[in-house]
Image (tube, helix red, strand yellow):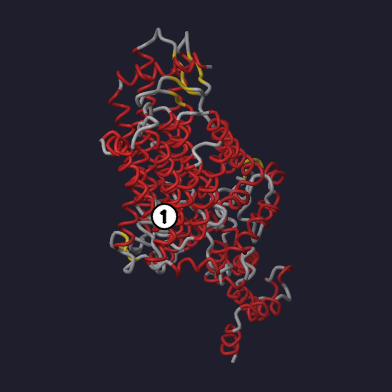
Amino acid sequence: MRSASIASARVINSLSQEATWSRRLILGLCGAILVFAPLAYGAVHTWSYFTVALVASTLVLILLAAAIYWLWARPEQALFLPHPPLWGAVVAGLILVLCQIIPLPQVVTSWVSPMALDIRSLGNSYGMASYLPLSLNPYATMLEGLKLWPVVAIFYVLLYTINSRHQLQALVGIILATALFEVIYGFAHFHNHLIWGWKNFYTDNRLCGTFVNSNHLAAYLTMAILVGFGLVMAQWEVVPRLAPGLTKERRLRLWSRAEHLEPRVQQFILLFLLLLLTVALIFTGSRGGMLSLITGFVLMGLAIWSQRWKKGHLFLIGIFVLAAILYSLWLGSAPLLTRFLDTEHSGRYSAFKGALVLWREFPWLGTGLGTFGEIFYRLEPASLRGTFFIHTHNDWLQLLAETGLLGFSIMAGAWLLFINHLLRQWRSRRDPFARGLGLGGLAALVAGAFHALGEFPFHITGFTLTYSAIAAITYITLFHHGENGGFEYFTYTTVKFSGNRLMTWAICLGLMGLQLAYIGEVWHYWQAERMAPTEIDSTRPVHRLTVEDWQQALGYNSHNSRYYLGLAQALETAVPQEPKNIREEDRLLRQAVFRAPAHWRCRLTLADFYVRHYIESPDRYLPQALLEYEAAVQLFPESGLLHYRLGTILAWAEEYHTGLIPPELRHRVGYHLEQAFKLEPQLKKLFNKKKG
């Protein structure tokens, strides 16, 4: 494949001369979002991750436009392009998401995911239809897919854009500069916990920078430190070696020259910068971050030792880690290091066990991306008192629960194959730059995946974008060959497009069409959230939403169950209760249940609505209300308030409307009240007070 690879490099170089503006624009925008995403609270809010999505989409369109221009400008020249790595996993992941959100015949859904059908059939079976999606919340699944696509786009955009070592070093420099700013900003606001003027209530006396969660800053710093250390090793042999047999005076005179002294000074400045980042990592108090960094350095050490490459690097790693620990202790990090003694994490352990239970219940395709928080209430113990676990605090287990064995096998298998492919290529390289930076990138990728065993960094866009960029940097570093900072040829497989260009044109135009469709979807989701915010964003004040706000949101996006809930509740308070309005509220609430059948709050809201209006049609509304209360209890069985609500309504119905109680709920008053008093003892006093 070398001849093809050489052609690939030459084509890329010629294209770069003709379309330098597009390459510079793409790399500039890539650097901009790699800075923006971490600084914007980690890009965890709607405005930030949709901004990233639109910019990443623009990058793809520019790249495809440059490719079309080259096809038009050079119709006679054969085109060689790098065979895209991981493309099979990307296509398989896209198909998986589509399978989760596209409605399938009910018989198919019952065969693939019988538990999903059971949950949808709870209560009055308002979650049922002839065609049903496998996901228990298709909106949440689609939103997760929209948030993940920029990560994929950045990887391929960088892969097809970078063509020199200077660009690789510049991107690493951007990551290190952003990490340094995080540290300086974090220490400047260490005691007041302000992030751009907003008071961060989610961290104690721990460094968080501009991330809401200190653990996510730790994950980011871990990757920056390891890839930066790789850059140090890559530049270690830049200094010319002195001839043997020189006298001490002659050796000292040569070492004082600029060509010897300046590179070493630059390397030690970079090492000092990395030392500061490591000390800051310790001050985040993140045990997962510290263990991940150690894991990355251990991987480096094992790789260096196995290849007998520069054993001095082993001593450098050991001295570096020891110096960082001692320096942090001198600055007062002892209380943060003692967090390793705290092993009481019942919430996380419950989430871990819950994810495994969900996998057993939804073994093949999972519950749907982004649905763990809603469905986990079925398994949440009473000791957590209804805490909303959006994430499992283990990205690998959450992947297993939300995408099933198929999705987990695709993603985990692709990651293992990719890392193995990079490691094998690293062993075959002898170039110090490729070996050093490649090993640093490998260690960063492994450390990030290791951190995901005890946290959820891959749900933080600021982290995942950087992880994707480091993956692209590592891949290009290990597979390119060249001198004087340029690329001469590649050693990875290439795809040849020659002769008839119609297929190439069709592929480029088709990809542009898909990207434009993605931009349209993102725009509609963003506009809907601007009209009626429903995603978590504690950094912005919440204002009272009107009927018009909810209606406009539904006009942009009709898939979000919370828009239906919000509009129904707004109609309840803003419009006189005429029969037509009551019917409209009923329809909206049933739509909310259909689109999020596993969310107990949707069931409870619908049941409360039926109870408030039961007098208008007792024969219809009261049985439906009781069944929806029962569904809410089944979806959150450890809620004392839900048991109390159902028990008291049943007691009232047995006294005044015995014949309207569904058969399966008769004589259940005692059980539900007993469960309520057991889970929430103070409810017994309230019950006795009302009874008296």
Which of 441 and 463 lies nearest the eye of the viewer? 441
- Of helix, strand and loop, which one carries label 1? helix
Image location of residue 357, percent across then percent down? 68, 57
The image shows residue 378, relative to residue 530, as above or below, that is: below
Which of 437 and 376 lies nearest the eye of the viewer? 437
Which residue does the numbered mark 1 point to in the structure image? 278
- Residue furthest to the bottom: 692
Q: How packed is label 1: few (under 14 Cα within 10 Å), some, or many (20 or more)?
A: many
Which of 385 and 588 lies nearest the eye of the viewer? 385
Asked whether, in this view, residue 181 is left or right of residue 474, the answer is left
Name the kind of residue labelled 1 in the image: Thr
Total number of numbered discs in the rendering: 1
Asked whether residue 262 appears in the rendered view, the answer is no
Q: Residue at x 57, y 90 (%)?
A: 689
Instruction: Please identify the quarter of the rendering in which residue 151 is found.
Output: top left
Asked whether residue 200 appears in the rendered view, the answer is yes
Asked whether, in this view, residue 674 is left or right of residue 375, the answer is right
Q: Residue at x 71, y 75 (%)?
A: 668
Image location of residue 88, percent across then percent down? 57, 31
Image location of residue 373, percent across then percent down? 55, 58
The image shows residue 262, relative to residue 165, as above or below, that is: below
Which of 552 and 247 lies nearest the eye of the viewer? 247
Instruction: Please identify the quarter of the rendering in which residue 29 is found.
Output: top left
Image location of residue 370, percent across then percent down? 53, 51
